[in-house]
Image: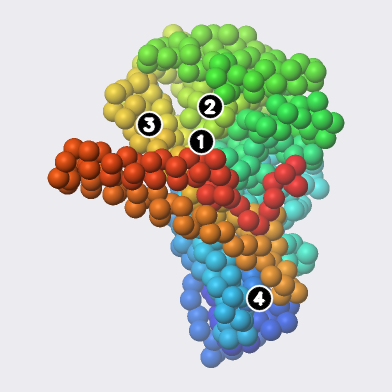
Amino acid sequence: LPDAHFRFYNQHTTPEKFYIEACDEGADAVLAIDRVSNEMTLTGKKDVPPSAVTKPICGVMGTIRLVAGMYLVVITRKRNVGSLLGHAVWKAVDFDVISYKKTVLHLSEIQSQENKTFLSMLNNVLSTDGFYFCTDFDLTHTLQRLANTSPDFQEMSLLERADQRFVWNGNLLRELAGQPELHRFALPVVHGFIVMKPCRINGKIFEWILISRRSCFRAGVRYYVRGIDSEGHAANFVETEQIVLYEGAKASFVQVSVSDARLHAFLLESEAQPEMDGFQRHFDSQLLIYGKQTILNLVNQKGSEKPLEQAFAKMVSGMNNGIYIAFDFHKECSHMRWERLQILVDAVTETQDEYGYFMVTSEGKTVSQQKGVFRSNCMDCLDRTNVIQSLLARRSLQTQLQRIGVLNVGQRIEEQAEFEKIYKNAWADNANACAVQYAGTGALKTDFTRTGKRTRWGLLMDGWNSMIRYYKNNFSDGFRQDSIDLFLGNFAVDETEGPTPLRVQKDWKFLTLPIIMLVAFSMCIVCLLMAGDTLTETLAYVMFWGAASAITATIILFNGQDFVDAPKLVHKEKLD
């Protein structure tokens, strides 16, 4: 890069200003942030007062306004993930959120409480594993996109040239983005999963890399963000790129996955023009970015997912944008018949050969471009999709490794035990990382990805994770969704100091009924354990408390929407 970002920083703090000093060799650049006027300027080391409190930091995530005023977010600890084409890739591990204001005495009691809630939302996102950055390489683009750029693109700063879909701190960097002279301090950060492994086959050492980039458009948690908005952004869109580097040669294979369309919108409004327009826009943009599309729809073709599959198939049939394949994952692979996944892999063999992959020889000659992508669609965008993606990626890798001279003719990846273990575990870790970001728990079915077999222990773990998901989806996902909306700028705290949406109070039912149900159920158990003088008396007590708990449970069930933890900051239907 002509103007790479700085790699090392010191943060100097005085009561009036923050000074972010670039500590790279030969650098004399300091980002000065006025804590009163919020103004940002570029200055030199000579302007940093000796009285300032100094500590080393790893980079600037950006700034954000909360109730108390502006806050500075910095990366305080990083871990090296590996090297991509000679560029160090880092995982951001710890962050600091620092108030411009020195006290919160100017806030009322309610404002102070709201500010604390917003701070905990911010920390909720920052504590979600999976933030990565690189100071001199663009992690937001695939190798193929980077190879097909103009000279103008090469002259841009990392922030300007980044694919905005994958810059998770884009909202936090807005102030810095408006001042080009400060761009070297503005570090684009991606969210998702990156693993880099040196591997050996036939005594030949190559680098195997897996990068999952989570889109920040319509990002969210499992039940609160689904479908496609009117701009054509799909919910919880993830781009996954597998890269191989060997003696100067490089190859890449890209796939995408999407959580499926919101059930009610597509079923009840599938004929509505805004939905169709958004759908059309989404597929048009996908064609421009990735070329041809093969949609692998992995939803069930019976039960609650059946109408969704039918509605989706109907919509896609009117698009003429590629191939649509519906594969009932649960039916085909029921009773642990996971070898049946090969049916789907075999069905798309010809298409995969046609789409190909991106490859550059050690001499720097591009010998192959990827002409299309497989797009895995699923209700949960993580468990089923990950299993299929790992199988398709392995097939592509087989060809790539033979072509660059790592695998001999007739050799199969499956027979390379040492590499297979690395490969399967990395894909399972990828599923887990994306699942935690999206559903709040680890992924399901990773026992198959890790071992190639479905195990009884795996089924037990899936049951446990499903239970945790159910709880989180109902009782903590609203807060998680609000956290993401605040972080990404879908909701902005108003400067006018008016009441925020956090002030919406739950009514008496929310607090009272669960307590009544719990007491009634407990009394029912106590009456069973401590029998009365007669059987009739015991039965009467049990029936009374049993009826009380059943009635309150029924009321709670019928008023389910009042009891779940719904998002408060952004009404998704308005976004759609």
Report the residue at 63% width, 42% height from top: 225
Q: CA distance from mark 2 to mark 1?
A: 15 Å
Q: Position of residue 117 (x, y in %)?
A: 55, 66
Three-letter code, disc 1? Leu
User: Of the residues under marks 2 and 1, which one precedes in the sequence?
Assistant: 1
Three-letter code, disc 3? Asp
Q: Which residue is mark 4?
A: 69
Q: Which residue is mark 2?
A: 385
Which callout, 3 or 4, points to the residue nearer the camera?
A: 3
In this picture, is 381 found above or below 481?
Answer: above
Marks 2 and 3 in Cβ contact (< 8 Å): no
SS for dot 2: helix
Q: Which residue is mark 3?
A: 462
Report the residue at 54% width, 40% height from top: 558
Q: CA distance from mark 4 to mark 1?
A: 39 Å
Q: Which residue is mark 1?
A: 210
Q: Position of residue 263 (x, y in %)?
A: 65, 30
